[in-house]
Image (spheres, rainbow, N blue to C red):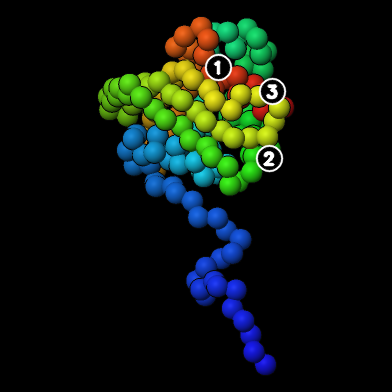
Amino acid sequence: MIFQSCGLRDDEDPVTARTTFIPPTTPDLVVFNLKSSIIEKDLNNFMKCLIDTAFNPRKYTYSADVVSQSQYPIFRFWAIGNEYSYYRNLLTVTNPQTYSDVIFTDVTWNIVADTAIFDAKYELLFEHNKTGAPKRCLGALRFVMSVDTRNLWSVHNWSDFKNTSTDTTWSVLKANFAN
């Protein structure tokens, strides 16, 4: 009897996707991991970038841009579970092979003891299949990060801003996939 190989080595798992996640022992690794979770469309790694209250007493908060706050009532009570739902819903209408990325520019850091503030302009590109939802978002954001009891960093406060009045921000994308 002759068996043909499907081309996999013995140590490869055909079901598990390869993802990039580096334990965030410094604040810049949180940003690297977030970017990787967008490129790789990885829900678990995206969530690992946000605070885990089992290891950090701080609460997660998200502040949408001012226009989105008034346009989308869901942002009044946005919590960590909304982040999970939005990103999961986004991934369900996205082909894993399509392009996605977030590009940060005009980056500034302010790090004091156990808190780091990351400010940047961003361009988020996400090729999903939902009609009417933005595939390109522009704006600015602020991540406030802290270190937890495991000495790992994560975002506990995320603020989104418009750079110009014509920007379609990340908040608009989140609102479109929140339910």
Q: Distance between the residues labelled 2 and 1?
A: 22 Å
Tally of numbered discs:
3
| Residue 78 in sight here | no
Q: Earlier in the sequence, mark 2 or mark 3?
A: 2
Residue visible at 39% across and 27% down in the picture: 104
Q: What residue type is labelled 1?
A: Thr
Q: Earlier in the sequence, mark 2 or mark 1?
A: 2
Crowd band around label 1 with a 10 angstrom C-alpha radius: few (<14), some (14–19), many (20+) = many
Instruction: Tell whether label 3 touches label 2 (CB within 8 Å).
Output: no
Residue visible at 50% across and 28% down in the picture: 124
Nearest-to-viewer mark from 2 and 1: 1
Estimate the x, y position of residue 16 in percent, counting from the top left.
Answer: 57, 58
The answer to which of 75 and 94 lies nearer the viewer is 94
When the figure is inspected, residue 136 is found, relative to residue 163, above or below; the finding is: below
Residue identifier under label 2 = 92
The answer to which of 51 and 169 lies nearer the viewer is 169
For the residue labelled by badge 1, is the local secondary structure a helix, a strand or a loop? loop
Estimate the x, y position of residue 84 in percent, counting from the top left.
Answer: 61, 34
Instruction: Tell whether label 1 touches label 2 (CB within 8 Å).
Output: no
Q: Which amino acid does label 2 sit on?
A: Thr
User: In the figure, residue 111 lies in which quadrant?
Assistant: top left
**The disc label shown at residue 168, or none:** 1
Residue identifier under label 3 = 132
The answer to which of 47 and 136 lies nearer the viewer is 136
Is 139 situated left or right of 72 in this image?
left
Q: Which of marks 3 and 1 is nearer the N terminus?
A: 3
Residue visible at 67% across and 93% down in the picture: 1
Crowd band around label 2 with a 10 angstrom C-alpha radius: few (<14), some (14–19), many (20+) = few
| Residue 42 in sight here | yes
Is 1 situated left or right of 18 in this image?
right
